[in-house]
Amino acid sequence: MTEKTLLKNIAVVNEGQITVTDVLIDNGLIRKIGQSDDPDATVIDGTGKYLFPGIIDGQVHFREPGLTHKADMHSESRAAVAGGTTSFIDMPNTVPNVLTMDILNEKYRIAAEKSLANFGFFLGVNGDNLDEIIQLDTSRLLAVSDDGLYFTKKGNLLADNPETMEKLFANCKSIIAIHSEKEQIIEENEQFYREKYGENVPVEFHPVIRSEKACYEATKRAIDIANKHKARLHILHLTTEAETHLFRNDIPLEEKNITTEVSVHHLWFSDKDYERLGTLIKWNPAIKTEKDRKGLFDALLDGRIDIVTTDHAPHTLEEKQRPYFQAMSGAPIVQFSLNIMLEFYRQGLISLEKIAEKMCHNPAILYQIEKRGFIREGYFADLTVVDLNASWTVDKDIIYSKCGWSPLEGTTFHSKVVRTFVNGNLVFNNGTFDDSIKGCALTKTSH
């Protein structure tokens, strides 16, 4: 670990501005922003490169403990830092499900030993542990969530259980982050297509089965209950244009009780891609229409959608290539999230400053993450260096997720993450990793 690093003449993308300047990293922190000369620092010439705050990914499934045949903290955090993501928040559907503080603390222990990136975890909530959750001081948690728990057994989705939501929303002091689909509507649709096609339902019906109606009705009901109790609700991975109209953009993020996110694959793919990629892009909620994709993008730009996440959810190729009902939902994508957004920048669809806002600043604001998400003096030196003029094509050789495949294979990107600093340590440098130094647990600001 070099004590000091000086990035010279680099274009800093931060808080709505791009400024060519120097950034001095010292003892894990951003010591100085501005013209610097320090004889003790390792100098990196940033001429022509761009510096972002490290990406904070508010939704991943890194699979450890219990599902490490497909992913683990070490492999997926490597994929994360290779893509410029310096902090992640992992979901509770590991095995065992994270339904107690003991299991949550065990995940923090594992991550401290294995993760190259900074880490945080959501505590799982369902009907079984609702009373225990309400007794906890949830204010110190990043959030509680039901996401992914429906894989364990039916009836675990909060969106399906208004009575559970009423009780939770009335009593929980933390953010409640939910997977918003109505299981009953989905099951009726599944039955219809099963009768028509048996087990081999064509995957292009996935967004019809996990339909706009299933999403919209669940989200509207959850928001209504949250508003009634003034609860702090976050809707995970929004997928429909219709739902975007349920969210506000007339107040700052700090004042919002109801927030939402979009995952990168719902911006990148649409239902026309099922023909080419099949179950490889089977996600829950489903990738939907071109109209939905555009509606999500519009809502991201105008502030109704607050943050960008990945919902990174690796499975083995064998688990993905089964018939429709058996094929697992989810795919690995954390390594490519910033690349995807930079491609949209190249297409003139979004500014670099807006990418920093949605992927760095806003996740830190939303989850009240201490001293991260911004390039500010005194903040942790979580930093991502990008070359906007470096074309490369995704192939198996550079996929760092343990499962070893990506729905983006064959895609050419025109920008590249060249360096990633986590707490001032250069953990990723032009394709090589420093595995020796691990990330830190995310802490919440005290106010």
Image: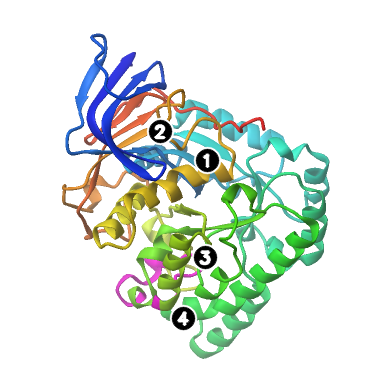
Separation of residues labelled 1 and 4 (CA atoms): 37 Å
- Tell me the number on the disc at residue 364: 1
The answer to whether 254 is drawn above or below residue 303 in the figure is: above
- Nearer the N terminus, badge 3 or badge 4? 4
The amino acid type, in three-letter code, at marker 1 is Ala
Image position of 341 (left or right of 389): right
Q: Is residue 315 magenta?
A: no
Give the quadrant of residue 35: top left
Q: Secondary structure at mark 1?
A: helix
Of 247 and 16, nearer the camera is 16
Separation of residues labelled 3 and 4 (CA atoms): 13 Å
Q: Secondary structure at mark 2?
A: loop
Residue wearing tag 3: 284
Of 16 and 166, nearer the camera is 16
Q: Is residue 282 visible?
A: no
Residue wearing tag 4: 205
The amino acid type, in three-letter code, at marker 2 is Ile
Q: Are marks 2 and 3 in contact (CB under 8 Å)?
A: no
- Tell me the number on the disc at residue 234: none
**Residue 54: x and y, percent?**
39, 37
The answer to whether 257 is drawn above or below residue 444 in the figure is: below
Image position of 119 (left or right of 170): left
Nearer to us: label 1 or label 4: 1
- Span of residues in magenta: 274-290
> Residue at coordinates 79% horizontally, 62% vertically from top-left?
228
